[in-house]
Image (cartoon, coloured by chain):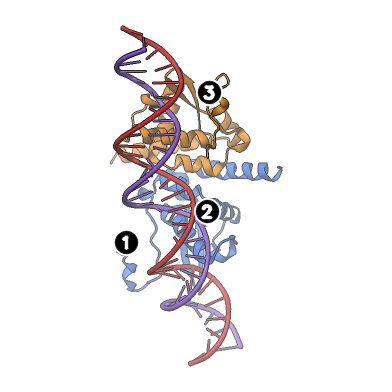
Chain colours: A orange, B blue, C red, D purple
Amino acid sequence: MTPVPRASAATSPRELAHPSCDEIRLEGVLHALSDPMRLRVVRELAVADAEVACSYIELPVTKSTTTHHFRVLREAGVIRQTYRGTAKLNGLRRDDLDALFPGLLDAVLAAAEVQSARLAGS
Amino acid sequence: MTPVPRASAATSPRELAHPSCDEIRLEGVLHALSDPMRLRVVRELAVADAEVACSYIELPVTKSTTTHHFRVLREAGVIRQTYRGTAKLNGLRRDDLDALFPGLLDAVLAAAEVQSARLAGS
DNA sequence: CGACTCGTACGATAGACCTCGTAGTACGTC
DNA sequence: GACGTACTACGAGGTCTATCGTACGAGTCG
């Protein structure tokens, strides 16, 4: 019942499973990006342009839910997560996404920007 | 309980409600595109580059389900539907989408193309 | 008119998803 | 070792969604 066998705790039991580039599916990426919370996370990660902790991005939901969204983003191949002590650093997989789907991430980010400005402007 | 009051059947009871450009939300578009069936429909509409009937696009699902997907696409603002006799013509709202989110549709279509080729090549 | 085709509407079902709360684990600090 | 912090896992509740089947309205053609 444990899909991820806990990485066997050999040396780094805190390795997180990321999909390889071959496993990243466009539908999954679009679905991950279609949630307002996750889109917000991705936008903040994009402007941060560096690895930030989960707690750095404040969402109007519980921490459990935040964890859930980060997991969805990771499993879709949108972000990369690595542990660093007690914190978990999150970064956009921009290189992989750009290689797989050129221009897609930028187009989505630009569209989010446009819409955000549109909604703010009235 | 009827969100759309049936257009009142005044003169054209067969007018379909489309969201205006202001009402098109990026999340909705991404969500509409995140379904394999709908992505397929959009791709076929893009290559057709003209208005085609629902039945022109063959999907491995029932006709009811096909109708459902077309409705989702229309309500998200991705396609435009108009009646012409017994058939219903579907066309991409390319102009509106390009105006709202420049490059987004092309990026998604290109990404779908890339992935399709990748999956076919094995 | 009758029959047929195209698409819709409604109900039902099963699965996925977002959200939360609580309990637990890993890591750092005192 | 004890405590606090950061995040996770699990279960639950409620909503949404994809799919189907059947029944129905609109239009076309014999």
On the same chain, marks 3 and 2? The answer is no
Q: CA distance from mark 3 to mark 2?
A: 40 Å
Residue at the spot of label 3:
A13
Crowd class of label 3 (few under 14; some 14 to 19; many from 20; radius 10 Å): few
Crowd class of label 2 (few under 14; some 14 to 19; many from 20; radius 10 Å): many
Residue at the spot of label 1:
B3
Kindly state the secondary structure of the residue where label 1 is placed: loop
Q: Earlier in the sequence, mark 2 or mark 1?
A: 1
Say which quarter of the image contains residue B75.
bottom left
Say which residue appears at 48% left-offset and 21% top-offset.
A83
The correct choice, above or below, for A51 with respect to A34 in the image is above
Say which residue appears at 54% left-offset and 41% top-offset.
B107
Left or right, A16 with reference to B23: right
Identify the chain of the residue marked 3, using the numbered disc in the image.
Answer: A
Q: Tell me the kind of residue under disc 1.
A: Pro
Discs 3/2, front: 3
Q: Tell me the kind of residue under disc 3.
A: Pro
Crowd class of label 1 (few under 14; some 14 to 19; many from 20; radius 10 Å): few
Discs 3/1, front: 3
Residue at the spot of label 2:
B38
The correct choice, above or below, for C14 with respect to B113 in the image is below
Identify the chain of the residue marked 1, using the numbered disc in the image.
Answer: B
Identify the chain of the residue marked 2, using the numbered disc in the image.
Answer: B
Q: Which of B7/A73 is in front? A: A73
The correct choice, above or below, for A68 with respect to B50 in the image is above
On the same chain, marks 2 and 1? The answer is yes
